[in-house]
Amino acid sequence: MFDLTRRRLLLTGAGLGALSLASPFLGAHRASAQAMTKPEDGAEITLLRWKRFIQAEEDAFMALVDNFMKATGVKVSVQSESLDDVQPKASVAANVGQGPDMVWGLYSLPHLFPDKLVDLTDIAESLGAKYGGWVDSAVTYGKSGDKWIAIPIAYNGNYINYRQSAVQKAGFQSVPEDTDGFLELMKALKAQGTPGGFALGHASGDGNAWTHWALWAFGGSLVDENDNVIINSPETRAACEYVKQIYEASVEGTASWNDAFNNKAFLASEVYLTNNGISIYAAANAEAAKGTAGMKEMAEDINHALWPIGPAGKPTEFHIAYPMMIFQYTKYPNACKAFIEFMMSPEQYDPWLQGAVGYLTQPLNAYENNPVWTSDPKRTVFRDAAKRTLTAGYRGSVGEKAASALAEFIVLDMFANYATGRESLDGAIKQAERQAKRIYR
């Protein structure tokens, strides 16, 4: 839990200036509080979020929290857990009926317990009307039936991160735009001693992102439009064979990677291509600013690319949605609603987006012109992640079943089981099929 009094002392003018937060935005935080839900008297709320990957994002977020407390008098405590621990902790809170008032989760997490959440339809519709409307995927993730059960406050674009020098040395001018060419690049990178690598451990972000991309790129899907399980298909078989080849062309050890492993391996020059948000590039820049040896050269060498197109013939990207939800057991639902409204206002959201330096992407169309996307061309690819992403259900619904399938890593484990040799192709697919049918019954 953060000591917010201490945070205020740490958020000095120098730090805020670097984030473009020492601007008219800070003087306008009381304006952000106008026309929002009135908090309950004496309200104190706790928010659970994932531990930051970029310090500047956390600093900007905590400045936003501080602004809210000054504007409303509501005390806010922020608890941070690892990305992979947010879902189980939120699920426990939902089941026992106590814990944080709000959770900043991942993907379709709210759909695991929709009946335990506060109806947010009023503020969702208001925010959409004010700020250019929601992107389509935000509506899908935020609504259960006709009711909004969560507010997707941001996305994390998950794209190809690569070292330009290694790709060019391998004989490619850039990352190929098709899956065949991409596989050839991976083989060439490994052959020259600059391998790539993708997480096949239980990595909620990176692992789910790339394995679902692969399944969908070859035309596979866990379920059809009616939520019938169709994972056992020729398209899935083709995807499994492809992922196995990618695994064999990768650095050793990816079967045990979680969401932090590829960041560390890339920054240590152990891998030269992986999938990630912009946090690797941001970390390299931050270390370069400190004078860390080799980091300036690495930051200059890093670039980002869209995911290749597979036999399906269309983009099949899967980026992380960040929904914020409020539990019904909270004593202060209005204060929680007010916090969300406050954070999504331009005076607060624009500086936060800039502080995140491309790690977060907006769900509301009005924010796509934020200068963070054009001040550094290497960030631009992340700007449209919310618009380009497919959702957790893909062909099927985004509801409790899709959320469960994602939480149980059904697709990721299928690929990992076959790629590593733990299961035969038939065995890996049939196991995934059994697990999916248990959920979709």
Image (tube, rainbow, N blue to C red):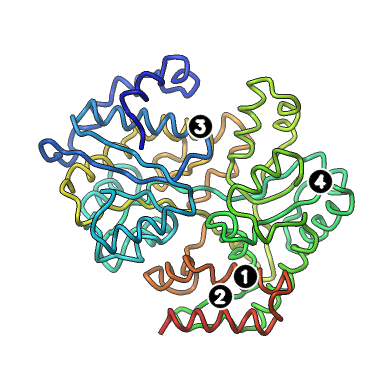
- Rendered location of residue 39, percent (x, y): 15, 39
x and y, in percent, of residue 350 in the image? 40, 32
Mark 4 near mark 3, Cβ–Cβ under 8 Å?
Answer: no
- Nearer to me, 113 or 222: 113
Tell me the quarter of the image containing the C terminus: bottom left
Secondary structure found at label 1:
helix
Q: Earlier in the sequence, mark 1 or mark 2?
A: 1
Residue type at numbered disc 3: Gln
Query: Disc 4 and disc 3: Cα gap in Å?
Result: 29 Å
How many numbered badges does the structure rendering display? Answer: 4
Residue identifier under label 3: 55
The tag earlier along the polypeptide, 3 or 2, is 3
Residue receiving disc 4? 167
Q: Residues within 10 Å of mark 2 (few under 14, many from 20)?
A: many
Dot 3 surroundings within 10 Å: few (below 14), some, or many (20 or more)?
some
Circles 4, 2 touching at the beta carbon (< 8 Å): no
Q: Are marks 4 and 1 in contact (CB under 8 Å)?
A: no
Mark 3 and mark 1 in contact (Cβ < 8 Å)?
A: no
The residue singled out by tag 1 in the image is 215
Q: CA distance from mark 4 to mark 1?
A: 25 Å
What residue is shown with label 2?
Answer: 221
Instruction: Name the residue rendered at 49%, 69% in the picture.
Output: 408
Looking at the rendered image, the disc whose residue lies closer to the viewer, 4 or 3, is: 3
Real-space Cα separation, disc 1 to disc 2, in angstroms: 7 Å
Q: Residue at position x 55%, y 82% from top?
A: 433
Q: CA distance from mark 4 to mark 2?
A: 31 Å
Residues at discs 1 and 2 in contact (Cβ within 8 Å):
yes
Residue type beneath disc 4: Val
